[in-house]
Image (cartoon, rainbow, N blue to C red):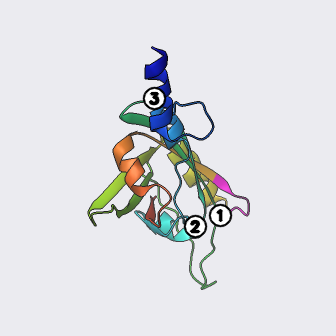
Amino acid sequence: MIAAVAMMVSCTGNSNGSGSQAAGDQAAGFSVQNGISGTTGTKNCHLVGLGVPITFEVAGEGDILDVTAKVKVQYKAPSDTTQKVEVEDMTKPAELWISGRDDDNKDVKLTLMGEEDTKTKFVEWLKTAPKDEYELIFKAKLPKADMDKLNAKQCTNTLVI
């Protein structure tokens, strides 16, 4: 048994000596190199600024992980001050798409869904033409293998609102 433990420690390549690194621990460092790079959906998509960072929280172990992404958007008034600000009620929950390419140049896309109350509160926030940030929260159960393919890479991160 001691030999088996010694072999496991040496095979992990872990210099900390703990010898174990659960799938959840590996994914806990999930990130992308850039923030929100585009928006789409309703008229609302033109009212938030780009470049906003995304923070990820990952929980669980195994092949499917629980992922929460948080995006603090800021209101962006139209550049043309004569243009009327139109806020549209959303019929679908907001989504966050994280898209990129794996090492074999194949498309990989992670889709996280906004919580239902986030959609309603977000539209109310837009209607007040706020100056403060608003935090959108997205959640999904995602394949660890796909997350590994996009981890720490430059991705196309689209906010669907």
Q: CA distance from mark 3 to mark 2?
A: 49 Å
Percent position of residue 31, x then y = 53, 54
Percent position of residue 8, x then y = 45, 29
Q: Which mark is residue 74?
A: 1
Dot 2 crowding, Cα within 10 Å, few <14, some 14–19, many 20+: many
The local secondary structure at tag 3 comes to: helix
Q: Earlier in the sequence, mark 1 or mark 2?
A: 2
Q: Earlier in the sequence, mark 3 or mark 1?
A: 3
Q: Which residue is mark 2?
A: 48
The boundaries of the magenta stretch are: 130-134
Q: Which residue is mark 3?
A: 8
| Closer to us: 28 or 89 | 28
Q: Earlier in the sequence, mark 3 or mark 2?
A: 3
Q: Amino acid at mark 3?
A: Met
Q: Amino acid at mark 1?
A: Gln
Residue occupying image coordinates x 35% and y 34%: 63
Which SS does the magenta portion mostly show? Answer: loop
Q: For the view shown, which residue lies furthest in the right direction?
A: 132
The local secondary structure at tag 1 comes to: loop
